[in-house]
Image (tube, rainbow, N blue to C red):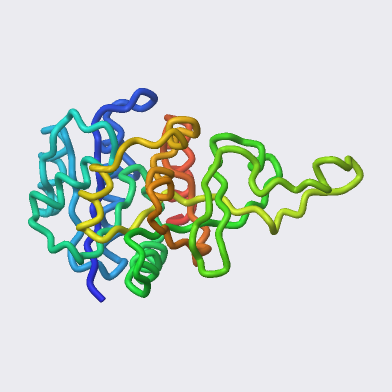
Amino acid sequence: MEFVVVIPARYASTRLPGKPLADICGKPMIQHVYEKACLSGASQVIIATDHQKVFDEVSTFTNDVVMTREDHQSGTERLAEVVALLNLDSNTIVVNVQGDEPLLAPDNVLQVAKLLNESSAPMATLSVAIEDKDDIFNPNAVKVVSDINKNALYFSRASIPFDRHAMLDEKRDLELSSFQRHVGIYAYRAGFINQYIALSVSPLELLESLEQLRVLYHGYSIKIEQAKVAPHAGVDTAEDLAKVIAFLQNKNA
């Protein structure tokens, strides 16, 4: 099985400007992500950026970098541009890795690519078990439910599934094993990426602010299974960045 990894690296960030170039133990964040992705067994790892500073920095450690437009409304649109720039075959498996995950688990990248390769679905993703009850009610922790065949049934910021007995009886605890949190890593067949951006925006994705709901709304399948490695949180803020730096310093001490 061959697959390609694409890492979008937008320079602009409201909470952490210039995020891809943030220094982490002597390397820019985007280099950490790239090096982790290279350990997944991908045939190629491409960084897609919209800013010359990022392009120039990435060019110091790899030639696999492309410049993309600044006006994309979503990461999937940027992915579609990369597929066109690289002229990828429609059956090529493309794994989209977020550029703000310097502690990326390479095993998870390989896992989601294999999950898609072994199915006829156009898209695949991963989840993890929820261990903190607060996450069930946290709208920033996206929950997902799936069927017996590893097909995602629905993604939501709400507490799904609704544990009726526990919710209505204060004496009963929530059964955490019933809940899964979505992990934002996706594998696509290259041809489906263009199909996706041609689909009309769904009312569900607007309500939940979850782009993947467009796929389910239009009747396509998304394969999902629990990640083999519990992923670390990405970097959204300066506080997140400090935690990653501290983690790596302690690991290398």
Residue 32: x percent and y percent? 30, 51
Coordinates of residue 48 in the picture (x, y in percent) = 18, 44
Q: Position of residue 81 (x, y in %)?
A: 15, 44
Relative placement, left or right, of 151 versus 116 is: right
Q: Answer left or right for 167 relative to 60.
A: right
Above or below, comparing residue 36 to residue 21 in the picture: below
Q: Is residue 50 left or right of residue 12?
A: left
Query: Residue 125's quadrant in the figure?
Result: bottom left
Residue that appears at 30% across and 33% down: 19
Q: How many marks?
A: 0
92 or 229, which is in the foreground?
92
Q: Quadrant of the N terminus?
A: bottom left
Say if 108 sits above or below 9 in the image. Answer: below
Q: Name, please, the residue furthest toward the top.
A: 14
x 26%, y 31%: residue: 73
Q: Position of residue 39 (x, y in %)?
A: 30, 66
Front residue of this view, candidates 130 and 88: 88
Residue at horizontal 25%, vertical 59%?
94
In this view, 99 is above or below 151? above
Q: Is residue 112 above or below residue 84?
A: below
Extreme residue in the right direction? 171
State left or right for residue 95 relative to residue 150. left
Residue at image coords 12%, 48%? 65
